[in-house]
Structure formats: structure tokens, C-alpha cells
Image (tube, rainbow, N blue to C red):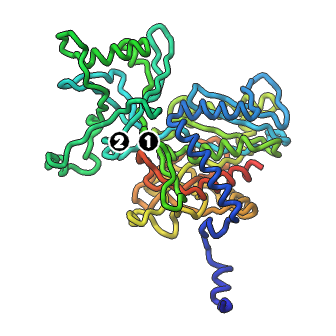
């Protein structure tokens, strides 16, 4: 092999050079990455809603020595505690050796994903078919959701206060549900609609049955039969849907993608592909220097408002409780703290390359992506991380051989989006976005790279340790 030219040597030294994780990682790393992703895929399959993700996380945490956080108790280094917040958000905390007034390390991801929710009065019958009316949740391309099998999860609170859990469609033998679409033969008019209107919000009606109640002349015999089934199975009457949270999500399972099995396809990678590695990093952290906190929030996909989203005080309240135990104040802890806002970013898609700017976008297999700012229309609606903090995180990743890259969410003015970063930064915490690049983000079936998932785990782990 010929020697490198002077120009080649100098460019290696001076040019920014993001590399493919397969060329940077050892074979052992690659094996670990694939093993890690098997467990991630399993977890994803049983955690398709924020409630399920939260419950499964708590189960894992308990099995790994975490106990329920008690605001009045005093904790010492190495103690591991959890908070299950209103069944939809989670905080995992490992108490560090340093006093918390010197700051903590936070990884914050969200565990809600775009989906199809039921309206409060969902059930109806039309010409012998039974349906649910829905109101979609989060930023979806509505045309992607018809003609795929859906399953249903959630809770119904009956008028006597009893709560029943609903889960239909996740077992192979369970029935599934579907939103129908028009056949192409008769879609002449529909085809003239814009893509955004191809399927309209009020057309996301879910087919749930067709069999009429047997021997009755009632005008809504199919609806009646369905209601009878619900009543037998859950003990509910129709008005109980008004106090329910019922979510339709894709019924198909996450799986390997590609002949080389290098990718994972599945529903809800955004943002469980960051949440799961952040949880695993917390579980594998023992007696760290600084106290480490993993926050799994709800409601990010609808703007983080509400008492389970990160616009609410639930995270700050936890720090206030923790601070009180150590004789300090929550705001002192927060202003000395550092956060990785763990959320996904767009992965460069060669088929739709014109929305991204190649020098500033994340690529599949180039590692975990750091995003200095998100937002839209000239960096509006974002926390733009400081050079100092970005420098700190870069050094941390380089020193620990974590493969990483930087990426913006698309070209300037091509669109944009936000994460929870700004809400945490607004609490005076140094915050930056770090997460896994995703293909087909917000689709019912999103794609990520196994190496990138593992590098996200490595990033959270070295941040905590
Ligand atoms: Mn996200
Ligand atoms: Mn999202």
C-alpha cells in the first residue's frame, strides 16, 4: 500500500471527519451492540404506550435494586430510587457521592409516541359496521395509518371509580383493528387531494366489528352487540368511554431490517430508542460521583404540556424534594446540573435528500447524534446549547470512544421541530440534544441503526459515570 500524501495526512488532521461506527468500533462492540438491540426490540414490543413503557421500566428498575422514592427519607451514595408519576412518566435516580448542590447529570427522554386516540364518545354504527371515532395524537402523516393492523391499549375508569385495563391485539391470537381506505379504482377524486388531506382526520375511523345482536330489531344492532361484548369483558357501559384513555397503535412487532440485520424497524422508536438506552445506563450505574437522573416524560409529541409532560413542574419538584433532604434548594441543584435531552433526530434519507443539508445532518451508522439546537424559522422554539457545554459533551464522547456525529433537523426553513431540551434548559440546566437518527420518523414503522442505538447507550453511560 502506498504511503499517504502530505495533503491526505493534513486533511486527516484538520478536517472534520465523521466516521462510520462499523469502522470505529471493535468487533466486540459490534457484538455488544447487536445483543443490546435484541433486548431493546423485546422491550419495544411490550411497551407500545407511555403507560406500558413506564410500568415495564419500573419492573426492570425494581429488579435492579431501585425502591420507590420517599420525599421524607434521607438517601446516601449508591441508593437507587424511582418515581412513577401518574403512571405515565418515570424518574430513575442513583444517588452520587458528591453533594447534589454541586449538580446532577440528567438524561431526559420521552415515552409517548404518535398514535390514534379515541374520542370521548367513540362508538358508532354505520350501515352494519361498527366503528370508533378517533382523534390522532402527535404529528402523523395521516395517510400512513389506514390498512395496517392496529391494537388497542389503555384504561377505562367506570362511573363507580373502578379502573379497568384494556389490551387487545398484542397477542398473535387476538383480533386486530384497522382503518379502511378507498380502493384505487374509485379514488379518482381522492387522488386529487393533497398528501396531507389524502386521509382526513375525521376519516381515521377504526373498524371494530360487523356482527349484529342476534334476535332484535334494534336499529343499532352491531353497536349493541359490541357494547354487550365490552360490558361482558370490562363491565362498562357506553358512557364509561368518556373517562378513558384508549390508544390505537400498530399491532406489528419490531424486527430486524435488511439482509445484514443491521437495522431495526418498529413502532415508537421516537423516542423509546433513546428512553431505553437511558434506562439501561441508569440501571448499570452504581455509586456514581454525581447523582444521576433518568427522566422519562409523557406528552412530548403534543408539546410537553400537561402534568405528565416536561413543561410541568414534576421534574423540578423531584429536585426540590431531593435538595431538601440534603439541606439545599432545588434551584441550586438545577443551575449546577447538566442534561442530555435524549431525543431522536432525522437520519439522512437518500430518497428524500433535498430536505437535509448533507454537512449538517445525521447519517445511519455514524453514531449517536448531537443536536446543538432544534426549532424552526431561525432557531425559534429551541434551547441553543452553549459552545462550552457542547465542548464538554464532545470531549466526553471522544475521550470514551463513543462514535458520534452532529445533525440538524433538516435544511434551514425546510420545517423543523422541537424536543424537551428547551423546557429543561429553561430551568437553568445546561442542556443539549443527543439521540439516535431515525428513518421514516413518526411513521407507524420507523427505522434505526443498531450501532447508533448502542452508541446512544454508551453516551448515556459515560455521561453518568
Ligand atoms: Mn421525539
Ligand atoms: Mn417525535
Q: Quadrant of residue 158?
A: top left
Residue 358: give x, y in percent of width and height.
Answer: 48, 69
Q: Which mark is residue 431?
A: none
Cα–Cα gap, marks 2 and 1: 8 Å
Q: Which of 157 and 318 is in front in this view?
A: 157
On the image, the x and y values in percent for residue 267 come to 47, 44
Would residue 74 be found to the left or right of residue 368 on screen?
right
Q: Which quadrant of the structure image shows residue 63?
A: top right
What is the x, y in percent for residue 68? 72, 26
The residue lying furthest to the front in this view is: 173
The residue at 46%/33% (across/down) is 170
Q: In this picture, is 115 found above or below 187?
A: above
Residue 128 placement, left or right of 55: left
Q: How many numbered callouts?
A: 2
Crowding near the residue tagged with mark 2, few <14, some 14–19, many ≥20 C-alpha atoms within 10 Å: some
Disc 1 under 8 Å from ligand 2? The reply is: no
Residue at x 58% of width, y 58% of height: 369
Comparing 293 with 221, the one in front is 221
Of residues 149 and 366, which is closer to you in this image?
149
Pick whichever of labels 2 and 1 is earlier in the sequence.
Answer: 2
Question: Vertical placement of 220 versus 43: above or below?
Answer: above
Q: Which residue is drawn at 50% across and 12% down?
A: 162
* Location of mark 1 (residue): 252
Q: Name the residue under label 2.
A: 148
Q: Do the residues labelled 2 and 1 touch (CB within 8 Å)?
A: yes
Amino acid at each position: 500500500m502506498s504511503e499517504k500524501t502530505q495533503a491526505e495526512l493534513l486533511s486527516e488532521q484538520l478536517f472534520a471527519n465523521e466516521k462510520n461506527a462499523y469502522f470505529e468500533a471493535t468487533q466486540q462492540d459490534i457484538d455488544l451492540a447487536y445483543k443490546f438491540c435484541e433486548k431493546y426490540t423485546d422491550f419495544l414490543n411490550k411497551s407500545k404506550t407511555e403507560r406500558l413503557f413506564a410500568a415495564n421500566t419500573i419492573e426492570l428498575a425494581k429488579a435492579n435494586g431501585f425502591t420507590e422514592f420517599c420525599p421524607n427519607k434521607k438517601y446516601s451514595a449508591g441508593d437507587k430510587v424511582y418515581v412513577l408519576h401518574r403512571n405515565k412518566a418515570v424518574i430513575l435516580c442513583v444517588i452520587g457521592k458528591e453533594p447534589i448542590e454541586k449538580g446532577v447529570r440528567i438524561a431526559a427522554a420521552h415515552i409517548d409516541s404518535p398514535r390514534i386516540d379515541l374520542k370521548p364518545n367513540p362508538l358508532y354504527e354505520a350501515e352494519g359496521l361498527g366503528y370508533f371515532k378517533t382523534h390522532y395524537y402527535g404529528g402523523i402523516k395521516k395517510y400512513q395509518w389506514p390498512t395496517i393492523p392496529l391494537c388497542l391499549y389503555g384504561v377505562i375508569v367506570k362511573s363507580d371509580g373502578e379502573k379497568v385495563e384494556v389490551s387487545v391485539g398484542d397477542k398473535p391470537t387476538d383480533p386486530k383493528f384497522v382503518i379502511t381506505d378507498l380502493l384505487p379504482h374509485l379514488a379518482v377524486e381522492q387522488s386529487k387531494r393533497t398528501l396531507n388531506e389524502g386521509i382526513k382526520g375525521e376519516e381515521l375511523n377504526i373498524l371494530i366489528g360487523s356482527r349484529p345482536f342476534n334476535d332484535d330489531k334494534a336499529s343499532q344492532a352491531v353497536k349493541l352487540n359490541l357494547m354487550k361484548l365490552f360490558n361482558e369483558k370490562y363491565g362498562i357501559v357506553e358512557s364509561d368511554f368518556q373517562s378513558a384513555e384508549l390508544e390505537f397503535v400498530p399491532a406489528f412487532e419490531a424486527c430486524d431490517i435488511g439482509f445484514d440485520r443491521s437495522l431495526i424497524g418498529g413502532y415508537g422508536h421516537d423516542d423509546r430508542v433513546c428512553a431505553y438506552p437511558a434506562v439501561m445506563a441508569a440501571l448499570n450505574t452504581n455509586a456514581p460521583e454525581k447523582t444521576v437522573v433518568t427522566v422519562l416524560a409523557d406528552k412530548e409529541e403534543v408539546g410537553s404540556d400537561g402534568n405528565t409532560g416536561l413543561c410541568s413542574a414534576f421534574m423540578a419538584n423531584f429536585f426540590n424534594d431531593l435538595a431538601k433532604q440534603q439541606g439545599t434548594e432545588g434551584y441550586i441543584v438545577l443551575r449546577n446540573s447538566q442534561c442530555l435531552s435524549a431525543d431522536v433526530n432525522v437520519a439522512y434519507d437518500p430518497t428524500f435528500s433535498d430536505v437535509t443539508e448533507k454537512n449538517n445532518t445525521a447519517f445511519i451508522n455514524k453514531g449517536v447524534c448531537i443536536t446543538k439546537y432544534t426549532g424552526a424559522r431561525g432557531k425559534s422554539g429551541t434551547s441553543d446549547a452553549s459552545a462550552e457545554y457542547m465542548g464538554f459533551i464532545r470531549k466526553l464522547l471522544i475521550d470514551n470512544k463513543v462514535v458520534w456525529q452532529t445533525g440538524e433537523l433538516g435544511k434551514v426553513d425546510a420545517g423543523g421541530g422541537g424536543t424537551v431540551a428547551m423546557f429543561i434548559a429553561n430551568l437553568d440546566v445546561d442542556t443539549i440534544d443527543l439521540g439516535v437518527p431515525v428513518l421514516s420518523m413518526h411513521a407507524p414503522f420507523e427505522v434505526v441503526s443498531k450501532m447508533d442505538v448502542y452508541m446512544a447507550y454508551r453516551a448515556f453511560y459515560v455521561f453518568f459515570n
